Image: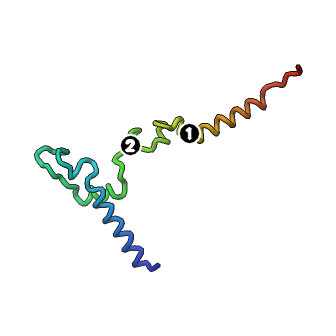
Amino acid sequence: MSKKYDRAVRRAHVDRLKKARASYYGYNRVGWGDPTEVNQTMDERQLGRVVHTPKCCSCYMCGNPRKWGTGDFKNGQDVKERSADEAYHAIECADLEPESDE
């Protein structure tokens, strides 16, 4: 694969993403944004930023749920990790219990 082909593919992907993400954040939608302008469009700078970083912020509603511990994630763990932790701790606790001589 030549260097020229790689650049062409990369530019094609950026163009594709620009078309797909032009309506992010309420732009190009009827009834959104400024009521005086029905069909607002992003300028090139905003569109470039949205192509490279599609999420507008990293709050607990928009960001990574593992970081914030929301939804199915508790303390940054998914269900499989939690069940594995519980099984591990159950085994550890069983090993630490004193044996009865009865």
**The C terminus lies in which quarter of the figure?**
top right
Secondary structure, mark 2, is loop
Instruction: Judge from the rendering whether residue 10 lies leftward or rightward of residue 94; answer left or right.
Output: left
- Sequence-wise, the earlier of marks 1 and 2 is 2
Give x and y (percent) for residue 23. Answer: 26, 53
- Colouring chosen for the image of the structure: rainbow
Secondary structure, mark 1, is helix
Quarter where residue 9 is shown: bottom left
Give x and y (percent) for residue 19. Answer: 28, 61
Spot the residue most to the top.
102
Give x and y (percent) for residue 48. Answer: 30, 59
Q: Residue at x 41, y 44 (%)?
A: 63
Q: Residue at x 36, y 49 (%)?
A: 55
Marks 1 and 2 in Cβ contact (< 8 Å)? no
Label for residue 62? 2
Given the image, on which type of amino acid does mark 2 rest?
Answer: Cys
Q: Residue at x 24, y 47 (%)?
A: 26
Q: Nearer the viewer, residue 78 or 60?
A: 78
Label for residue 79? 1
Instruction: Tell me the mark number nearer the camera, choosing from 1 and 2.
Output: 1
Give x and y (percent) for residue 30. Answer: 17, 48
